[in-house]
Image (cartoon, rainbow, N blue to C red):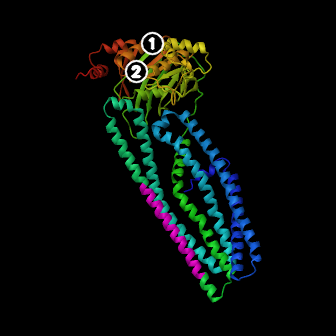
Amino acid sequence: MIDKRLFQLPEIKPLFKMLAGLTILQAFMILLQAKFLAEALVISWQRHNLNSIVQPTIFFIIAFLCRHFLTWVKDALLDKYATKTTEDIRGQLLDKIYTTGPQMIAKNGSGNIVTNALDGMDEINNYLNLILSKFMNMMIIPWIILVFVFFKNVTSGIVLILVFPIIILFMIILGYAAQDKADSQYAKYVVLSNHFLDALRGLTTLKMLGLSKEYAHNIYTVSEQYRKKTLSTLRIAILSTFALDWFTTLSIAILAVFLGLALIKGTIPLYPAMVTLILAPEYFLPLRNFANDYHATLNGKNAFTATMKILAMPTTKQRQLLPEFTWNQDSQLIIKNLSFQYEAKQQPNDLQNINLQIQGYKRIGIVGQSGAGKSTLLDVLSGFLIPQEGNIQVDGHNLPHLAQDGWQQQFTYLPQKPYLFSDTIANNIRFYVPDASNQDVQHAVEQADLTQFIKSLPAGLETKVGQGGRGISGGQAQRIMLARAFLAKERHILIFDEPTAHLDIETEYSLKQTMLPLFENHLVIFATHRLHWLEQMDYVIVLDQGQIVEQGPVQQIIQKTSGPFYELSAHMRGEQ
């Protein structure tokens, strides 16, 4: 129930001290509340003067109000701490995503990351609010009450102390069952998140291929599994709550029987018996509250554990080994025996024994069937993925990986599906050069052939796009990405990951004419499955199942009448 990493959170120890002090005061308020209530009841039973009830009644009301004021103070402190801590954790998670990048996404799934960063933070907030208060109440209040009851009546104290471990044991047994169910439920929730996010991303492609209904059935199946897991967890939660309430009620009834028999025999006065009976429900209340909220905080605990696991992932180190440099005609990148593996189990797009030598402003085309490892190789070359093995050298500097600030400040990345931030078109173009002038942005717009499109917009370059903004077609989004590249004049490496894969032939041809001038004085690394792009390349790399099976100058490779490239091109033309 309590994740040990909870005690490693910043400022948690001072908070625990404050909560402990307030809880001790709260426990004494409960004792005073019971004392004065018992006095008022005994006075009424003994038919004393009505005025004699006023004083204990007033003291009872004061103790009651003080008790709930202390509860309010604790809740306010916890809410403030939980909100601040949750925001700090969210910031750390976003920083970790930024610094670790695709390697984390590949391992945890984008749906899982999004779920943790959004819904998971609310669950963690709720977890911190509930668990700290309930835990402190359960650890302090029952024992102060027990000591007081022992002073009033030893037999009652023995009954309470014997019953307590039995209830704890029962709660632990049901708690393990609930934990297993909740873990299974949370795992299904992660699967559902990943499926749903992947479906949203590929909805256009699924519709085009006529697979949207089939995939909708897949999501329905996963959501049904999640629903069943949720109901199964709720059954355990309701059963354990009912059983705990039944046991505590039975324990109070047993205590009442002992007190009643003692009163009949005259071995105990009315006042201590009354105080003990009033305190019995208060003795079990922290335990009952903890058990009831146990199920409400399980998702929060799972979210907290999952987030802490992500934060514990190793951050890419040695990012400053490459000093600031500018890629030029004489620059050289040498890669020897590089390997990258996503998971322990080998996958087709894992890279194996990659050897490359790239120099100057060369245009390199990377081709291969889907799943051959083209995107993985680009991610390694971009520094988004860290290889497990291999030697890398840039301009004579030996590097363990390409996640170097100096290297990454030299390239512009154009993916299959361009991402537009929720901002103006102008600020989206300024992505690599945030302080670019309006004149420079306008020039980049002209170079990317966006002028007519921008003029057609009422707000022009100040038009909001991205989430909550104006919709943009795939072709126009790619042109905005090209404008980014035209504006980033100091970056001399272009990395393209099939930028025209989702465009129709006419849009692709138009975009190609705009893109070609950008290739001048740049190292171009262009992954594609459309072979007509090779006409603009100097060198070609053929990938198959994560290995370079053929490479060389384009004219030399395409003239061959056999070999991996010939077989690949024949396959793409539909030939046997």
Nearer to the camera, 293 or 169 = 293
What is the secondary structure assignment of the residue under circle 1?
helix
- The residue indicated by pointer 2 is 500
Instruction: Choose between 376 and 197: the one closer to the eye.
Output: 197
User: Left or right of 145: which side holds 174?
Assistant: left
Q: Earlier in the sequence, mark 2 or mark 1?
A: 2
* SS under mark 2: loop
Q: Residue at x 47, y 61 (%)?
A: 238
Labelled disc at residue 514? 1
Identify the image quadrant of the C terminus: top left
Q: Which mark is residue 20?
A: none
- In the image, the segment drawn in magenta is 231-258
Most extreme residue toward the left is 576
| Amino acid type, label 2 | Thr
How far is the residue under mark 2 from the one under mark 1?
13 Å
Residue depicted at 32% across the width and 37% down the height: 213
Q: Residue at x 50, y 25 (%)?
A: 470
Q: Specify the quadrant of the image occupied by residue 369.
A: top left
State left or right for residue 80 relative to residue 366.
right
